[in-house]
Image (cartoon, rainbow, N blue to C red):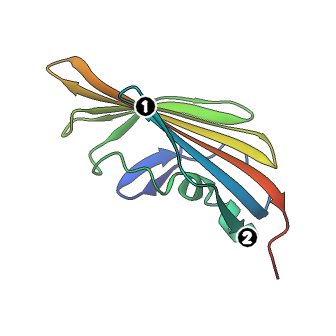
Amino acid sequence: MPAICIEEVCLPARAAEPQPGLWEIHKTIEGGGTSTVRPTRTRCVTAAQVSQFAQMASHEVTVGPATCQNLDLHQTETGMTWTTQCPTLPVRIAASYVVDSPQHYIWTFRRDIIVAGHVLATSTVTIDGRRIGECPK
């Protein structure tokens, strides 16, 4: 299965595509007993950028060097789930995305920090994107 590389980490290719236009992006980070909602952003997505959906949706999430490997890939009609294991780092990522319509997607990244085979910390990043119209001219 083809992959898309982001900041030295390869992610599986997309299963479904969002529609070009103006998107509102909501990002929530949970971990250590706290939840942080980042300021909502808008982003104009062109037809050319739709083909790079995985990079667009997760450009802020860095999980490790190129030695990380994607495992347990499961593709559906609307999205994909997978696990990323990093042998040179104590990190395991469980990730998924769903494009439930051309106007909406959700990405979820759960990052476990592992030392001596035990999970010491977990954090989850959720990115929720909604198309809100056409891009400004």
Q: Which residue ends up furthest to the right in the rendered image?
A: 133
| Quadrant into which the C terminus falls | bottom right
Residue 91 in picture, x, y percent from top left: 28, 34
Q: Earlier in the sequence, mark 1 or mark 2?
A: 1
Q: Residue drawn at (23%, 25%), measured in percent from left and top?
A: 114
Can residue 18 be seen?
no
| Residue type (three-letter) at the residue carrying disc 1 | Thr
Can residue 133 be seen?
yes
Foreground disc of the pair 1, 2? 1
- Residue under label 2: 46
Helix, strand or loop at label 2? It is loop
Q: Quick one: label 2, few (<14), some, or many (20+) residues within 10 Å? A: some
Helix, strand or loop at label 1? It is strand
In the displayed structure, would residue 86 be above or below residue 56? above
Q: CA distance from mark 1 to mark 2?
A: 35 Å
Q: Residue drawn at (30%, 47%), measured in percent from left and top?
A: 64
**Residue 16 in which image quadrant:** top right
Badge 1 vs badge 2, beta-carbon distance below 8 Å: no
| Residue type (three-letter) at the residue carrying disc 2 | Thr
Residue 82 in picture, x, y percent from top left: 49, 31
- Horizontal side, residue 137 vs residue 24: left or right: right
Residue 108 in picture, x, y percent from top left: 55, 35
Q: Which mark is residue 34?
A: 1
